[in-house]
Amino acid sequence: MRIVTRPDFDGVVCAALLYEAEDITEPVEWAEPSDMQKGMIEIRPGDIIANLPYNERCSLWFDHHYTNTINKSFNGVFKIAPSAAGIVFGYYQNKLKQNYRELIKETDKIDSANLSMDEVLHPENYPYILLSMTISGRNKADRAYWNRVVDLIRRCEIGAIIKDQRVEERCRTVNSNNKKYKELLKKHTRIKNNVSITDFRSLNKTPDGNRFLAYSLFPESVVNVKIRYDDKERQIIALSVGHSIFNKNCNVNVGLLLSGFEGGGHHGAAACRFHVSKADDYIPEIIDILIKNEPNEG
C-alpha cells in the first residue's frame, strides 16, 4: 500500500494523516496532476490517491478539484472543499491519535487562498503559511525534504517544526526569495484590461516566491496569469491562473477553462502544461477569455 499525492502543502498534510490512519510502510509516491492525467504514474492495487486525479486501479481516492469530478463509484471521498487534507481528516478523524484540527484549519485557509493582506505581505509572521511556502513540486530533488515535513507533522507542533534545522534553512531561503520575487513580479508583469500577466519566459531561471503577491501588487486585476518554462530544454510551458483573493470579480471558472488546454484545477485556481509549439495558440486564447470575464459554467 502506498500514498500517491501531490508535492504541495495540502499533499504533504494528506500524507501525514494517511500514514497515521493506515498501515503504510512504503515511501510516498509524489506526483503532479498532469503526469497522472497522462498516465505517466504507475498506480497499483492498494494505492491511496489524495489531492490528484482519480485512477481506477487505486483502492482509495480523496480529492477536491473541480475538474477531477468523475461519474463512477469509488472508495473514498470526493467533494468540492477548501483542501484535500480536510477531506482525509473527516474520513479518518476517529482513527487519528493526534489533534490535527488547527493544522486542517490552516491547510484549508492556505489551499483555498483565504488569506488577509497582512498574511500575504508578511508570511514570516505566520508559521503555517511560511512552512507551506517551503514546499514546491518544481524540484524533484526535494523529495527528502517533503518526506521530512510529513514526519515532522506527525510528531511535532508547529513551533517545533519551524525550528527544525532544515525547515529553518528553507524558511530563511523563502523570506529571501520573496523579496527578490516581488521586484521580478513588478518587472515582468503587464496589465491587460482586468488581467495581470506575469511572463517569466525571458529569464534563464524561473524565480520562486510568494504566489499570492501578485494579487496585492496589482489590485486592479481580477485574475493573474503566470507563464514560465517547466523544463531545462524550454520545450514545456507551465501556465497557471488564479482569481485575485482581494478583487473578487472574476467570473471565469479557471479550472474548467484550463481543462480545455491540457490542464485543470479549481474554480478559482488552475494550471496547465503544454508543448512550446502550442503557445502562440493557447496563451492568447486563454487571456482573451479571461479579459472577456464571462461565466463559462452551464
Image (cartoon, rainbow, N blue to C red):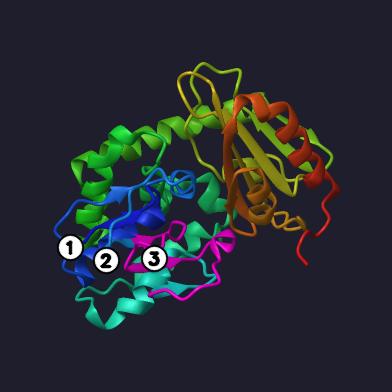
In this view, 128 is above or below 41: below
Q: Which residue carries the number 1 mark?
A: 24
- Density class for disc 3 (Cα within 10 Å; few <14, some 14-19, many ≥20) is many
Residue 26: horizontal and vertical position, in percent? 17, 54
Is 89 within the magenta? Answer: no
> Of helix, strand and loop, which one carries label 2?
helix
> Quick check: marks 1 and 3 in contact, CB under 8 Å?
no
- From which residue to which does the magenta span run? 49-75
The image position of residue 227, as x and y in percent, is 62, 32
Question: Looking at the image, is mark 1 or mark 3 earlier in the sequence?
Answer: 1
Q: Are marks 1 and 2 in contact (CB under 8 Å)?
A: yes
Whether residue 106 can be seen here: no
| Number of numbered markers | 3
Q: Determine which residue is flagged by label 2.
A: 18
Horizontal and vertical percent position of residue 59: 32, 68
Between 284 and 207, the one nearer to me in the picture? 284
Q: What type of secondary structure mainly makes up the magenta span? A: loop
Check the picture and name the quadrant holding the N terminus: bottom left
Residue type (three-letter) at the residue carrying disc 1? Ile
What residue appears at the point 49 percent right and 36 percent down from the top-left corner?
Answer: 209
Where does label 3 land, which residue?
85
CA distance separating discs 1 and 2: 8 Å
Give the residue at x 50% y 65%: 64
Amino acid type indicated by mark 2: Leu
